[in-house]
Image (tube, rainbow, N blue to C red):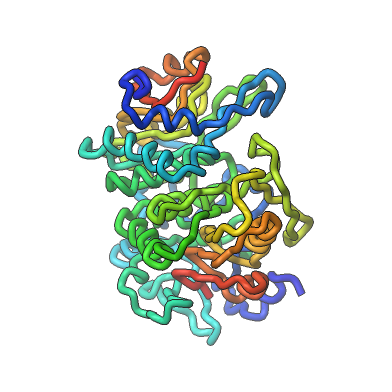
Amino acid sequence: MSAYKDKDPRIHGIKARIRVVPDFPKPGIMFQDITTLLLDPSAFKDTIDLFVERYKGRNISVVAGVEARGFIFGPPIALAIGAKFVPLRKPGKLPGQVISEKYVLEYGSDCLQMHVGAVEPDDRALVVDDLVATGGTLCAAINLLERVGAQVVECTCVIELPDLKGRERLNGKPLYVLVESH
Amino acid sequence: MSSLQQLAKFRAPSQLRMGGQLGRCPSCSFSPPGAVRASDLGRSTTEKAISPKLTCSAAAEKSGSFAFTRVVDTEGAARGPGTGPVRAQQMATGDASDPRIAGIAKSIRVIPDFPKPGILFQDITTLLLHTKAFRDTIDLFVERYQGKGISVVAGVEARGFIFGPPIALAIGAKFVPMRKPNKLPGPVIAEEYSLEYGTDKMEMHEGAVEAGEKVLVIDDLIATGGTLGAAIRLLGRVGAHVVECACVIELPELKGRDRLGDTPLFVLVSSA
C-alpha cells in the first residue's frame, strides 16, 4: 500500500524533493536520493508525520532501522511512538554479541547484524529503510527479528521501486511506502 | 606518543584496563568479542531463537549479573559495579546537575576490547533501547540549540545519523549527512583526515550547505577529534559557520576538544 495512492496532500511535496541521480552507483541505475528531502525541513517533517500517524497507538515496541539511511528515518519515528530504536548493521560494526543474517545481492552476498538481547520475544517491530528495491535487505531484517521471536508488524520505506517486486519477498509481511518510482 | 601509549600510563592492576575509542575502525572481525553475561558463557555463540536479555548498567547493578570491565579513574581507584562505567558530566552550560544526565550515562554500555584489545568501546545502542534516556538525550540538545538561528545539523555517518535528524526536526533545521567516500550519489566535496594508521575521507554533497549558514555538527562520541575536525573544515570550505560540535560522549584524555580549532564542544557525558 502506498500513501501516494491515498493522495495525502503532503506526498506531492515529498516526492518533489527526492532527487534522481542517473548512473549511480553504476551505469543504468537511477538512484533515488533522499538527501535532498532532508534539506527541506517541512517536507522531512511531513515524511516523519505520515509514518507516525500510521504507527502511533499500535503498540509497536521496536523500530528497527537498516544501516545507514534507515538510521535517519527510524529514530524520529521511534521517539514519537515511544518505541526502542534498534540499528541493523553491516558486519563488524556492532560492538557486542550479535546475530547475523546473510542475504543475496546481484553479485555475491552481504550480511545484516543485530545485537543479541536488543529485541525480545514479546516485541512488536516495525522495519524502516529509505527505499525498497529487490526486498533482499528487508527480508534479512525480518528474519533477524523473527529469529529472536519478535513479531514484525510491517515494513515501511519512503520509496518503493515496484518493478523490482520487493513487496513479494517479505515473507508475507505488509509493506507501506509513501512514494513509488517506476 | 600514540594515543594508546598515552593511555598505557593509566594502566592499573591486571584485570582492570583503560582505553578509549580511537575514531572509526576501518575493519573489524566478523563477530567481535562482546560484553556477555556470566550466565551466557556456557551457551553456544551461534545464533539461537531466544536471546539473552540485554541489560544496561542500571539493571545490572540490581541483578549483579552483567560482566563489565571496570574503569580506572585518574586517581587510580577502581570503581565498583555500583557506580557504573561512565561518569556523567555537563560541560559548557554550567548546570552540572541536570537530573536527566545520570540516566543517560547509565544507559551507555561499555564493551571491552572492541574494535581491538585494550579499547573500551562506548556503546550507545543500549541508550536507544531506553525510550526515556533517548528522549532526554535529544531534549537536552534541542533545549540548547533551538532559537539560535541554526539552519543546518550535520551528522557524521553512521551514529550521527541517529541523533542528528531528531534534533534537526525539532529545531527546524536541514539535516546534512557527512559520509564515507562513494556513498553520496551526487557531486561531493571531500576532506581527508588522519587515523591512528593512515587516513580516511569524509564527503558532503555540493550545494547542501550555503555560505553564511549556521551549522551544528553531531556525532555520538568524540575521541581524538579527527572526524569532527574534518567536518568543521568541510563546512568552512563552503563558507558556513560551525557554531558548535555536540556529542553524547567525550573521551577527554584523547584531547579531541583541542583539535577543533575555535569551535566549541558540548557533550552530555564524559568517560575518563
Tell me where residue B251 sits by quadrant.
bottom right
Q: Is residue B23 visible?
A: no
Q: Position of residue A67 (x, y in %)?
A: 52, 40
Residue drawn at point x = 64 percent, y = 21 percent: A29
Q: Position of residue B265 (x, y in %)?
A: 55, 71
Tell me where residue A25 sits by quadrant.
top right
Residue at the extreme left of the image, as rendered? A57
Residue drawn at point x = 57 percent, y = 45 percent: B31
Q: Is residue B189 above or below residue A22?
A: below
| A9 sits to left or right of B31 | left
Residue at the extreme right of the image, as rendered? B198
Q: Position of residue B62 (x, y in %)?
A: 28, 66
Q: Quadrant of the N terminus of chain A?
A: top left
Q: Is residue B6 visible?
A: yes
Q: Which of these two is toward me, A140 or A53?
A: A53
Tell me where residue A143 sits by quadrant.
top left
| B24 sits to left or right of A172 | right
